Image (spheres, grey):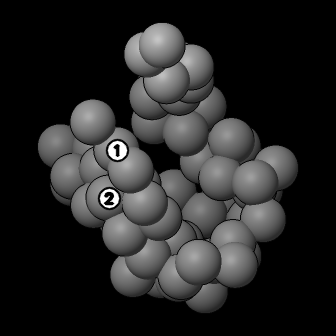
Amino acid sequence: MITDVAKVGIAVRTARKTLGLTQDTLAAASGVGPRFIVELEAGKPTVQMDKVFAVLAVLEITLQLEPPPR
């Protein structure tokens, strides 16, 4: 379960490396700058969600939100 931005960054880095992509290549394919990829993978808490979704789409990672159990 991913519960913070740092874990999102780890998931992105892992997927990127599994696909054999460099940070620059992923940035270009996602329409974001290379610095954004570096900051996302580092777990920067102020990343822009629209850019995060663009990166996740290139990596074919889905994001699922679940309400807390009651």
**Label 2 to label 1: alpha-carbon separation:** 6 Å
Nearer to the camera, 48 or 59? 48
Looking at the image, which residue is at 53% across and 82% down? 44
Examine the rendering and report whether any part of residue 23 can be seen.
no
| Residue 9 on image: x %, y % | 38, 63
Kind of residue at badge 2: Lys
Nearer to the camera, 45 or 23? 45
Q: Is residue 65 above or below residue 1?
A: above
Q: Which residue is mark 2?
A: 7
Is 30 left, or right, of 65 in this rendering? Answer: right
Q: Quadrant of residue 22?
A: bottom left
Looking at the image, which residue is at 59% across and 78% down? 45
Q: Secondary structure at mark 1?
A: loop
- Graded by Cα atoms within 10 Å as few (under 14), some (14 to 19) or many (20 or more), the crowding at tag 1 reads few
Mark 2–mark 1 CB contact (< 8 Å): yes
| Residue 38 on image: x %, y % | 47, 81
Is 24 left, or right, of 34 in this rendering? Answer: left
Looking at the image, which residue is at 60% across and 31% down? 57
Please, which residue is most extreme toward the front here?
A: 70
Q: Secondary structure at mark 2?
A: helix
| Residue 33 on image: x %, y % | 71, 76
Kind of residue at badge 1: Ile
The N terminus, quarter of image: top left
Q: Is residue 9 above or below residue 47?
A: above
| Residue 40 on image: x %, y % | 51, 71
Which is more N-terminal, label 1 or label 2? 1
Is 4 left, or right, of 58 in this rendering? Answer: left
Examine the rendering and report whether any part of residue 44 can be seen.
yes
Residue 2 is marked as 1
Looking at the image, which residue is at 45% across and 36% down? 59
